[in-house]
Amino acid sequence: MENKNRSGAQRHFGSVIRLFLLIALCVASSLILVWPLWKFSTSFPKVYTVIVLALIGGAAIFFAVKKIIKSDKISVIRFFVNLILIALTIILCVSFILGGNRLLGLIIFLAGIALEILANIIFSKISQAKNRS
């Protein structure tokens, strides 16, 4: 009986130790990774913005090239139409909101969603017609 209680106590003690180790890991990772990025972004906001935008652009180019290599023409066209619609919607929406035209920004955002849905419906109809042939 005493052996069972001891193993239960050891399990709970092990769980508490793991919890504290997880908390220590989170704090250490924030000190090692998050704090320098925050300090860099507040000290040099323009350089940080350029680097982040370059990384996002590089990732977008990587995924676009990967998609082009693997896919047929319709899928590639669908990808680029979706990419252009999303990018234009975000750019126009943010520019109008920052310019003070919130209502126009909301209308553009909703129109972008509607155009995205419409484009995907059209492309799925094209894909279905192509698969039937």
Image (spheres, rainbow, N blue to C red):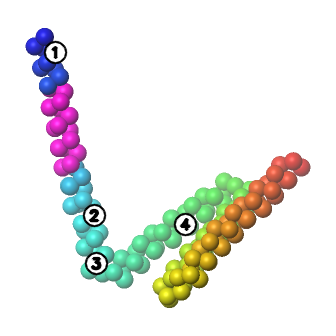
Point out residue 91 in the picture as x, y percentages from the top left corner: 55, 79
Answer whether residue 132 is visible to the viewer in this image.
Answer: yes
Front-lying residue, 24 or 12: 12
* Mark-to-mark CA distance, 1 and 2: 43 Å
Can you say whether 75 is above or below 5 in the image? below
Q: Mark 2: which secondary structure?
A: helix
* Mark-to-mark CA distance, 3 and 4: 26 Å
The span shown in magenta is 10-24
Three-letter amino acid code of the residue under disc 4: Ala
Q: At 61% from the left edge and 77% from the top edge, which residue is drawn?
A: 107
Q: Quadrant of residue 39?
A: bottom left
Residue assigned mark 4: 60
Q: Mark 1: which secondary structure?
A: helix
16 part of magenta stretch: yes
Labels 3 and 4: the sequence-earlier one = 3
* Mark-to-mark CA distance, 4 and 1: 57 Å
Residue assigned mark 3: 42
Three-letter amino acid code of the residue under disc 1: Lys
Contact (Cβ within 8 Å) of mark 2 with mark 3? no
Which residue of the protein is positioned furthest toward the right in this rendering? 133
Can you say whether 93 is above or below 34 in the image? below
Contact (Cβ within 8 Å) of mark 3 with mark 1? no
Query: How many discs appear?
Result: 4
Residue assigned mark 2: 34
Q: Residues within 10 Å of mark 3 (few under 14, many from 20)?
A: few
Quadrant of the drawing holding the N terminus: top left
Three-letter amino acid code of the residue under disc 2: Val
Q: At 73% from the left edge and 65% from the top edge, which residue is drawn?
A: 119
Q: Quadrant of residue 122?
A: bottom right
Point out residue 86 in the picture as x, y percentages from the top left corner: 60, 70
Q: At 16% from the left edge and 15% from the top edge, which residue is drawn?
A: 4
Residue assigned mark 1: 4
